[in-house]
Amino acid sequence: MPQLIGIGYEVIILSLTIILFFLIDAKTRYYLLHLSPLILLDEIFGSSLQLATYDQNMFSAYLAGVPLIMPFSWFVGFGLSLMLSKGRLSYLRAFIAGMFFDSLIELPMIYNGAWSNNFGKIHIIEGYPLILPFFYGFYVLWFRVLLDYLVPRLESYEIKSLKSYKIRSAGLLFAFIYIPSQVIISALLGILIPI
C-alpha cells in the first residue's frame, strides 16, 4: 500500500508539472526550471542533518536518500503559488499561497508516512511542524521578490564563450543566489519563530 501512495503521488506531481509548464509565464518557468533541480541539494542537505527523513520504500527513485520526485514537487508548489500571486498584493498572496500549497502537498504525504520533518517544537501532526507552512510561505515570497528585483539585473548579464556564443546564465545565477539565501531564511525563521 505505501508504494501505491508513493507512485500515485509521483504520477500526480509529474502530471501537474507538465500542465504547469505550459500554464505559467515564460519568465517564471525559466527560473523555476533552473531552481527546481538544484533544490534537490537543499533536500539532501536537510536529510543529512536529519531535519527530514523519507520512507525509502515508497517512491520509485532516490538520490542520497531523497526521492527524485522532490524537485518536481517544488516546481508544482512554487508554480501554483506564483500563478496565484499575480496582481495586487502580490507579496502577501505569494506568502499565503506558499503556505496553502505546502499544506496541500505535505500534509497527506506526512500522514501516510512518506516523509517526516524533524524540527520545530509544535507539530500539527507528527512530522509536520507548525512552522513549516511559514517556511514555504517565505520561500515563495522570497522567490517572488528575487523575480521582481534581482532578475532584471541578472538578465542583462551574459557570458561570452570562446566561440563567441552568448550563454544565458541568469537562471543558474538566480538558483545559486536563491538556495543559500533560502537556507539562511530557514535558520532565521527557526530562531525568530520558536514554534
Image: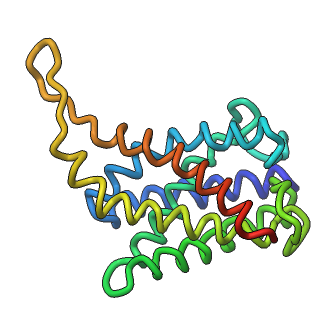
Where's residue 123, x and y in %?
Answer: 87, 70
55 or 27: which is nearer to us? 27
Quadrant containing the N terminus is bottom right
- The residue shown at (43%, 43%) is 177
Residue 176 in which image quadrant: top left
Counting from the top left corner in percent of width and height, residue 92 is at 47, 81
Residue drawn at (85%, 75%), measured in percent from left and top? 124
Q: Nearer the viewer, residue 113 or 43?
A: 43
Based on the displayed image, in which of its 4 quarters is residue 41 positioned?
Answer: top right
In this rendering, position of residue 76 left or right of residue 165: right
Residue furthest bottom as drawn: 88
Furthest-left residue in this view: 164
Q: Vertically, is 100 above or below 13?
A: below
Q: Residue furthest front?
A: 192
x, y percentage for residue 73?
A: 58, 55
Which scheme is used to colour this image of the protein? rainbow
Q: Is residue 93 left or right of residue 147?
A: right
Relative to 151, residue 65 above or below: above
